[in-house]
Image: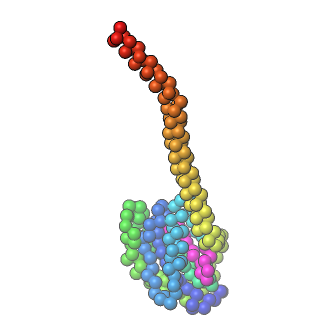
Amino acid sequence: ARRVSPSSMVKLTMLARVADGLPLAEGLESDRQADLETYKQQAKSLFKKLGTGPPPPSRMSYESGPYFLHYMIEGGVCYLTLTDRGYPKKLAYQYLEDLQKEFTNQHGHDSIETVARPYAFIKFDTFIQKTKKLYQDTRTQRNLTKLNEDLHDIQNVMSRNINDILGQGERLDHVSSMSETLRNESRKYSSRAKDLSRQALIQKYAPIAVVIGFVLLLLIGRHWLF
């Protein structure tokens, strides 16, 4: 069985609604020495991107510096955890499955779809902390047994670099922004072209209109004089 040092552990846990990336719950960080704000922001960016484009994979692992971001999607909720590189993927997904089962048992699906405020289920942190303790030490008999289980679906989970998806999203956002700018410029150009066209027509026919008006005035004047 694979053994990992006690320092290799679950660092961060977050839950979010897939449809719009709304944060639902978070495991309050107890490891004060690690600055995880960068990885929290990466997780939040990932949540926002999951609800756009084609349906995302139900499970995925993203490499980010010395850590891995593992997520699973079930019932419209994304369960995500940040672990050290050396932490076994099997245990990471077993941990997420335990969270998913309990969260679904407590809250079902209806409340998740209708909730409007962020972190509406922050009290779920109690269960997160309790469950995280069970998975921190990979050398316990419980976790060694889980590591020896044959989990085919875990073996098929893809791994990518977090910059691939976030960078791709930024490029798509840039292209979208450029397209919107071009549309705005096109509308401005079209409006300007119409204005210039009207001015050209006025300049072209104004002298003729003046002459016609002058002739009409002469004719009217002669009519009244004679």
**Residue drawn where x is 50% and y is 35% of the image:** 198
Q: Is residue 163 left or right of residue 45?
A: right
Residue 36 x/y as whole percent: 51, 82
Q: Quadrant of residue 139?
A: bottom right
Q: Is residue 24 left or right of residue 35?
A: left
Question: Which secondary structure dominates the residues rendered in magenta?
Answer: strand
Is 77 magenta? The answer is yes
Q: Looking at this view, is 162 or 182 the one in front?
A: 182
Q: Vertically, is 124 above or below 6?
A: above
Residue 9 location (% of width, % of height): 55, 86
Image quarter of residue 23 = bottom left
Q: Residue at x 37, y 77 (%)?
A: 123
Give the residues drawn in magenta, as a range: 62-78
Q: How is the image coloured?
A: rainbow
Looking at the image, residue 51 lies above or below residue 83: above
Q: Position of residue 179 (x, y in %)?
A: 57, 53
**Can residue 25 be seen by looking at this rendering?**
yes
Nearest the viewer among 103 and 1 is 103
Position of residue 16 relative to residue 190, above or below, is below
Residue most toward the left?
A: 224
Identify the residue at image location x=52%, y=73%: 43
If the image is split into quadrants, where does the C terminus sit? top left
- Residue 142 appears in view: no
Image point (61%, 83%), residue name: 66
